[in-house]
Structures are given as structure tokens and as C-alpha cells.
Image (cartoon, rainbow, N blue to C red):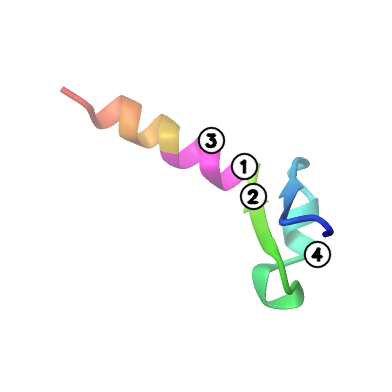
Amino acid sequence: MGAQGVILGCTEIPLLIQQEHCDIATFDTTKIHSEAAVRFALAK
């Protein structure tokens, strides 16, 4: 069994590699963190 996902843990890597380029799940940490920051900022 191989990897089940790849963490794109640098701000520049998602510019080069997108989900459509991979057969396994990719996780863009910049997107994950920015979406979490917006949710936190908008929470009441």
C-alpha cells in the first residue's frame, strides 16, 4: 500500500501541482489555513 494523500505544505507548491495532476488526495495547507482564518474571523 502506498501513500493515501500528499500535503502541499509550501505556499508555492500548489501553484505547480493541483488535484487534477494526482491520482491521490492533495491537501493545500495555505488554502486550509486561510479558510479556517476566515471562518474564525467571521464567527460570532
Q: Kindly identify which residue carries mark 2.
A: 28
Tell me which corner region of the image, top left, top right, bottom left or bottom right, holds residue 24: bottom right
Q: Which residue is mark 4?
A: 16
Looking at the rendered structure, the kind of residue marked 4 is Leu
CA distance for labels 1 and 3: 5 Å
Q: Is residue 33 magenta?
A: yes
Do the numbered discs 3 and 2 sit on residues whose CB atoms are within 8 Å? no
Q: Helix, strand or loop at disc 2?
A: strand
Magenta: main secondary structure equals: helix
Residue visible at 64% across and 50% down? 28
Q: CA distance from mark 3 to mark 2?
A: 9 Å
Q: Residue at x 74, y 48 (%)?
A: 8
The part of the image, by quadrant, that contains residue 35 is: top left
Q: Secondary structure at mark 4?
A: helix
Mark 3 or 2, nearer chain start = 2
Looking at marks 4 and 3 on the same chain, the residue that comes earlier in the sequence is marked by 4
How many residues crowd mark 1 within 10 Å: few (<14), some (14–19), many (20+)? Answer: some
Q: Which mark is residue 33?
A: 3
Element assignment for label 1: helix
- Callout 3: helix, strand or loop? helix
- Residue 10, how many percent across, how many down? 78, 41
Marks 2,1: beta carbons within 8 A: yes
Judged by depth in the image, the label closer to the viewer, 2 or 1, is 2
As drawn, the residue found furthest toward the left would be: 44
What amino acid does circle 2 point to?
Asp
Dot 2: within a 10 Å radius of its alpha carbon, few (fewer than 14), some, or many (20 or more) residues?
some
Residue interval drawn in magenta = 30-35
Q: Could you say which disc has been placed on residue 30 in the image?
A: 1
The image quarter containing residue 23 is bottom right
Give residue 43's position: percent from left, percent from top: 22, 27
